[in-house]
Image (cartoon, rainbow, N blue to C red):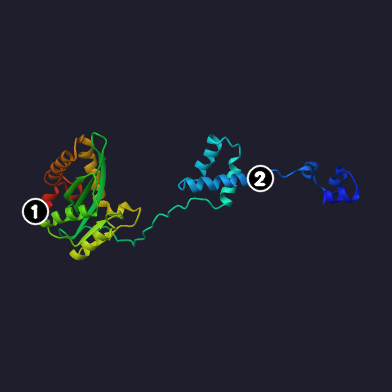
Amino acid sequence: MAQAVVRERGVSVRVACQCLGISETCYRYQKTLSGENQQVADWLLKLTATHKRWGFGLCFLYLRNVKGCSWNHKRVYRIYRELELNLRIKPRRRIKRDYPGELDVPKAPNQVWSMDFMSDQLASGKSFRTFNVLDDYNREGLGIEVDTSLPATRVIRALNQIIEWRGKPAALRCDNGPEYISQTLIDWANEQRITLLYIQPGKPTQNAYIERFNRTARHEWLDMHEFTSIAHAQFLATEWLWQYNNERPHSSLGGVPPKSLMKSA
């Protein structure tokens, strides 16, 4: 409007700006960035096509530090969003579980077993995992399997070995780890007619018996030794588990070891 007044009425720029309520700087502003915006867009399209796993941060740092471009990060990000180049982040799968009920003490052995994983390192720095199984009735540790990898097939094999001498449980309580929710373990449990009791995600207190056992194992076994190999860790785990079941008094059992309660039962 100011340009039209100056052109058609022949008035000065100052008068036209005062009449229309704009500044002279605004009147004289010339858009000069449209060509550069296209250049930014071309660079972003080229980078995201060549490096498909690069996000905005890497693209901007490449343009600024490698190519020496002086474009502001806000401007580059605005064009990045307009081109819809944002990386698609795979949503985390949310498992919904019903509340499994109060954590009652079973009335007899082999009614409910609890199982969980722990992790530690060898002296060389290599990580390993342990698969722990506990009978909720007398808090007896039924087994500790140690290895660098414990997939669902190893979990099933360890449970079968325990079942051979202990008998089959009516239910297994566990969290929502990938080994426990795998179809392999579910099919095995259905075949054995064993109920899988999943706790709610983020609620470790619903599996409190095995969590308390893990704390004891961490404090009295894992933190007390430096393991040179998987076989060494497995040997010390078996030795400690025997002491835990036969000699170590358990405060929740009236100060007697788990095996003593088993004999009285």
Mark 2: secondary structure: helix
Residue farthest toward the right in the current orientation of the protein: 10
Q: Residue at x 20, y 39 (%)?
A: 221
Numbered mark located on residue 184 in the image: none
Give the residue number, with chain letter if any, for mark 2: 35
> Tag 2: residue type?
Gly
Quarter holding the C terminus is bottom left
Q: Write down the quadrant of residue 195 in the picture.
A: bottom left
Q: Are marks 1 and 2 in contact (CB under 8 Å)?
A: no
Foreground of the two, 250 or 148:
148
> Tag 1: residue type?
Lys
- The spot of residue 190 in percent (x, y) is 22, 65
Viewer can see residue 173: yes
Eyeballing the image, is 83 above or below 223? below
- The spot of residue 226 in percent (x, y) is 21, 34
Give the residue number, with chain letter if any, for mark 1: 263
Foreground of the two, 35 or 12:
35
Q: Residues within 10 Å of mark 1 (few under 14, many from 20)?
A: few
62 lies left or right of 111: right
Q: Residues within 10 Å of mark 2 (few under 14, many from 20)?
A: few
- The spot of residue 122 in percent (x, y) is 23, 37
Q: Write down the quadrant of residue 166 in the picture.
A: bottom left
